[in-house]
Amino acid sequence: MFPWRDAYSVRIVQIDNQHRDLIGLANSLHAAILKGSAAGMQARIMDELVRCSGNHFAFEEAVLGQRHYSGMASHADEHQRLAAELAAMRESLRSAPPAAGLELMLLLDKRISGHILACDQAYAREFKSR
């Protein structure tokens, strides 16, 4: 559902690898939903996605701080919003009927890809121009 594309690359290997891992978890969740896997399995994948995204946000913010990214404050705010949305999605998945999982996947895909293509590419462009 959510393949890695070169357009997602920020040209920082560790961050690109973390983005690939997050996309992999989103794809695992999508596959579990399509297969009708047990709700517990779906919840475990979503829990891992929330955990890994939190770790990724902290790592990315540390890198951006070290490189003195001019948009650091707004980027960190966006991470907080996205983390809250992911937590809400996790709760929605736990309480929603199975068909709602596919709607959740579309939202998840939109939010992850949108964040990488907009917010993360902004710092990639700034670093490239230096």
Image (cartoon, rainbow, N blue to C red):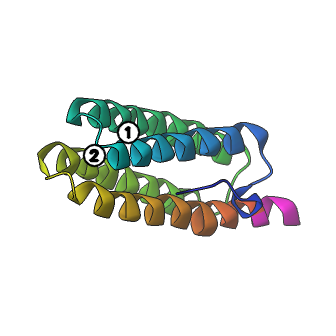
| Crowd tier of the residue under label 1, counting other residues whose Cα lies within 10 Å: few below 14, some 14–19, many 20 or above | many
Left or right: residue 69 versus residue 13 is left
Q: Secondary structure at mark 1?
A: helix
Amino acid carrying label 1: it is Val
- Residue at image location 75% in from the left, 60% down from the top: 124
Q: Which is nearer the eye, 13 or 113? A: 113
- In the drawing, what numbered circle is on residue 87? 2
Residue 20 is situated, as x and y percent measured from the top left of the image, at 63, 43
Residue at the image position 39 percent from the left and 64 percent from the top: 106
Mark pair 2, 1: CA separation: 7 Å
Residue 49: percent from the left, percent from the top?
A: 42, 38
**Seen in the image, is 39 located left or right of residue 119?**
left
Q: Position of residue 5 (x, y in %)?
A: 71, 59
At horizontal 40% and vertical 31% (from top left) the residue drawn is 48
Labels 2 and 1: the sequence-earlier one = 1
**Image height check: is 63 above or below 123?**
above
Residue on which disc 1 sits = 50
Amino acid tagged 2: Ala
- Of helix, strand and loop, which one carries label 2? helix
Residue 26: horizontal and vertical position, in percent?
Answer: 46, 46
Q: Nearer the viewer, residue 109 or 13?
A: 109
Query: Magenta span covers which residues?
Result: 125-130
Label placed on residue 105: none
Tags 2 and 1 in contact by the CB under 8 Å rule?
Answer: yes
Disc 2 residue crowd, few under 14, some 14–19, many 20+, Cα 10 Å:
some
